[in-house]
Image: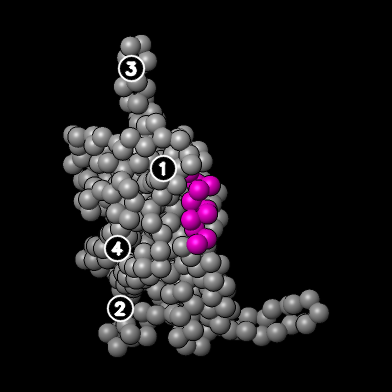
Amino acid sequence: MPVARWKRPLALTIKVAVTLLVLWALGRQVLRTWDDLRSHEVAFHLRPARLVLSGLLYLVGLGCCGAFYQQVLRASPSPIGIAPALRAYLISHLGKYVPGKAMVVVIRAGLSVPYGARAATSAIATFYETLVMMASGSLVAAAGFALAGPSPVLALRLPAVGTIAVEQYQLAAAASLGLALAFLLVVMPWAFRRLSLLFSLPFPKVGVEALPRFDGGLMLRGLGWTTATWICFGASQIEVVRALVPVEASRWPGLMPVVTAAVAFATVAGFLVAVMPGGLGVREGILMLALAPAVGGEDVAVVAALVLRLVWAAVEVLSAMILLPLGAHARRVPQLPAEAGSSVP
């Protein structure tokens, strides 16, 4: 049929276009980060082994979120195995460098469908995994800042109240707690079931039969998996700091809560500014401010935040380069009949 004849070239063209768009966006961000890094003329003695360890910790953290993504799909009518789920999850992270973050959903769904997942279900699972991750990140940030030591005092001017003095970490803890409550409200099973019906609207002939079974157990498991992610991310940032300046072992227990809180809060803030690819600028700016009191000054905090961005981008690129060919010859699993011809109830 004429339509079938054009189907394969069209699909190939779309894949090439998406690949080029992602590579362009990623390259632009890496160059901007590198230029920012070069503008800070501070002498550091890099320890490459620490950067490698930082990258491995970041990869483990991503794997925890990927495992939760697979659990969400496992609770749906179209589950897939852990290996293809992790592959789709890790590769799709390159899509966050394209403004708008929608490319993450497109890539992850495209990589999950050949293994049996529905496009709509994969998209909904992606939204849920991300929102649960943001909820746990906000909780981790609130707890970490609350446990942190003294921080610089800020003078805030409030209408009808006047100027009040509040510590930087206390303010960050309060803001993080507010974000946590908002995200938790969204990921509650009864609330997200209703939202997921809106997410599935762009997908034709797919209704409630494509939705995962959202319940309290799934949400709690997600909070557990993603909390492990934030702990790994915080440890990754500490290793970057240790790659730049010596850090005494006795300081690690005190650094871990505040550094993890800083990474979590900065990442959640970057996520909320959807127009910025990968939270560029927003995440680094907040991370620099939050890290400075803990790591020994603004210079170390600025460079550590920028180097972290480069390390994480390198891990994402290497992961995609290794994993993408592994599924190049995956056999397409037939979709459930409801995907092809069912109507929305």
Residue projecting furthest to the front:
345
Looking at the image, is mark 3 or mark 2 earlier in the sequence? 3
In the rendered view, tell whether residue 81 sits above or below residue 178. Answer: above
- Residue position marked by numbered label 2 in the rendering: 246
Location of residue 192 in the rendering, given as x and y in whole percent from the top left corner: 49, 58
- Residue position marked by numbered label 3 in the rendering: 4
Mark 3 element type:
helix
- Mark pair 1, 2: CA separation: 48 Å
Mark 2 element type:
loop
- Residue position marked by numbered label 1 in the rendering: 120
Mark 4 element type:
helix
- Residue position marked by numbered label 4 in the rendering: 64
Residue at x 37% of width, y 22% of height: 10
Residue 196 lies in the magenta stretch:
yes
Looking at the image, is mark 4 or mark 2 earlier in the sequence? 4
Residue at x 29% of width, y 88% of height: 250
* Bounds of the magenta segment: 190-200
For residue 108, what is the image quadrant?
A: top left
